[in-house]
Image (spheres, grey):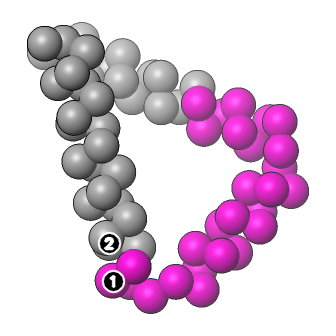
Amino acid sequence: MATYLLVGVGVAMVLEGILYALMPGGMKGFLSQISEMSPDQIRLAGLVAVGAGVGLVWWVLK
């Protein structure tokens, strides 16, 4: 179980790193847009991302 968690964290770090490396200007713009969102909007986006991630992991490991 811990192995899957560490692999998942590693993959997330690789994907984020690729985005920052390939388009730093775009990521700065994205982060500035997030800073203008309300906490409720950010929370909803986070919950949607968690749900999508759990669904994807469940589907792949099924």
Query: Relative to residue 40, is residue 3 drawn left or right?
Result: left
On the picture, is 31 further left or further right than 40?
Answer: right
Q: Secondary structure at mark 1?
A: helix
- Amino acid type at circle 2 is Arg
Q: Amino acid at mark 1?
A: Asp
Q: For the stretch drawn in magenta, what is the main secondary structure?
A: helix
Instruction: Provide residue 14's location: percent of width, then percent of height.
Output: 58, 26
Position of residue 33 measured from the top left corner of the image (x, y, whole percent): 65, 76
- Image quadrant assignment for residue 38: bottom left
Q: Which mark is residue 8?
A: none
Please report the bounds of the magenta region as a residue range. Answer: 15-41
Dot 1, how many residues are within 10 Å of its Cα: few (below 14), some (14-19), or many (20+)?
few
Give the camera-side residue of 6 and 51: 51
Residue drawn 86% across the image and 56% down it: 25
CA distance separating discs 1 and 2: 5 Å
Is residue 39 or residue 60 the one in the foreground?
60
Q: Is residue 61 magenta?
A: no
| Image quadrant where residue 39 sits | bottom left
Q: Nearer the viewer, residue 10 or 37?
A: 37
The residue labelled by disc 2 is 43
Q: Is residue 28 within the magenta segment?
A: yes
Q: Which residue is mark 1?
A: 40
| Residue 56 visible (yes or no) | yes
Please, what secondary structure does the residue beneath circle 2 have?
A: helix
> Badge 2: how crowded within 10 Å, few (<14), some, or many (20+)?
few
Q: Do the CB atoms of the residues marked 1 and 2 lie less than 8 Å apart? A: yes
